[in-house]
Amino acid sequence: MKQTIESTKARMNRETEVLKAQISSLEKQITTEEDKSRELEHKSKMFCRKASNPAADTESLVSGVSNNHESEGEESDDSCDLYFNDPQQLLNIFAELEEQNLSLIQNSQETEEALDEMKQ
């Protein structure tokens, strides 16, 4: 009986140590995920600020490069006012850019064909 009690205590101690290690690991994961969350929140606010600037060019919105040199210290923790009030506005801009890109591709192909004909 005494041996069974000590065996049970030893097993419970091992299980306790395993649980403590798992808890420690989970706490580290939580800390890491919280750090990632704060970083993404910051990036989201910066993107929101850039997107809400009507003077911002499309390249800076897509690449994340800003033409204005606002310091990050001036950033507001409040949600920003968006330049685009309707998702369709952004879709329309993307459609327009796509048309422009296709036109440029077509023009460059035609120019390349003309150049090839001139070489022959």
Image: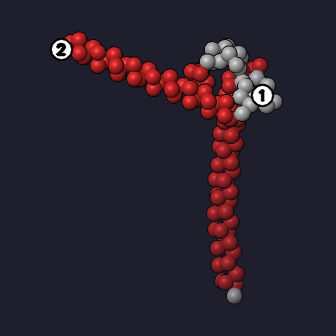
Residue 106 drawn at (x, y percent):
40, 23
Given residues 53 and 72, the one toward you in this image is 53
Would you place residue 114 above or below residue 78 in this image?
A: above
| Quadrant position of residue 22 | bottom right
What number is the disc on residue 80? 1
Would you place residue 100 above or below residue 18 in this image?
A: above
In the rendered image, the quadrant that contains the N terminus is: bottom right
Q: Secondary structure at mark 2?
A: loop
Q: Secondary structure at mark 1?
A: loop
**In front: label 2 or label 1:** 2
| Quadrant position of residue 4 | bottom right
Q: Amino acid at mark 1?
A: Cys
What number is the disc on residue 8? none
Color encoding of the figure:
secondary structure
The mark tally for this picture is 2
**Left or right of 61: which side holds 116?**
left
Residue at (61, 27) in percent of width and height? 93
Classify mark 2: residues with Cα within 10 Å, few (<14), some (14-19) or many (20+).
few
Measured Cα–Cα span from mark 2 to mark 1: 59 Å
Classify mark 1: residues with Cα within 10 Å, few (<14), some (14-19) or many (20+).
some
**Left or right of 104: which side holds 80?**
right
Residue to which mark 2 is pinned: 120
Residue 49 in sight from this viewpoint: no
Residue 25 drawn at (x, y percent):
64, 53
Nearer-N-terminus badge (2/1): 1
Residue at (68, 16) in percent of width and height? 55
